[in-house]
Image: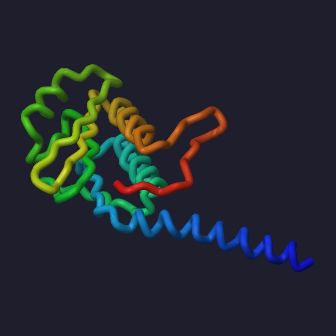
Amino acid sequence: MNVRRSTLCLSAAVLISAVLAPTAFAEESPAVTIVTAAGASPLETLASRELRRYVYLRTGRLPTVSVPGALPGGDVVVVRKDHLPAGAAEEIRAAAQSLAPQQYILKTLAAGPRKTLWIVGGDDPGVLYGVYRVAERLGVRFYLHGDTVPDVRIAW
């Protein structure tokens, strides 16, 4: 009986440390803001919500979603080519104009310590496909039985 109780206590301690240690690591990652267009379509709204969910599941930090005219610091931008905000680089604008329906581009631009991830689609499904590609790069896998998200949290 004592061996069984000791094994149970040891298992609980290992489980608690496995759950708490990645959370402490994830707290060091910077805040993330997801920027969407003011008149976002239902699929663009879904894309920003899905990105928010997967970033939270992988990092333990819940990103904020905002609709500003200019870009805040340290952000993830989910837009279509029709809704590029002020501050979008010319290379992003040029690439967005050449996108066909259901195509997307992922581009990270750095300005000092701030990094901006651009997820730009040729149309609404293109934005959603881009978000799912980012989720795959975060380690999420999509199967017929559902999404598989790794247990270990990562820094953004």
Above or below, 90 relative to 30: above
Seen at 58% across and 43% down, the residue is: 148
**Display colour scheme:** rainbow
Between 30 and 76, the residue placed more toward the observer is 30
Between 40 and 71, the residue placed more toward the observer is 71
Residue 126, quarter of the rendered image: top left
Q: Position of residue 80 (x, y in %)?
A: 25, 36
Callout count:
0
Q: Position of residue 143 (x, y in %)?
A: 60, 34
From the image, which quarter does the N terminus lie in? bottom right
Residue 104, quarter of the rendered image: top left
Seen at 7% across and 34% down, the residue is: 90
Above or below, 33 relative to 45: below
Left or right position of 89 against 77 = left
Q: Position of residue 66 (x, y in %)?
A: 26, 58
From the image, which quarter does the C terminus lie in? bottom left
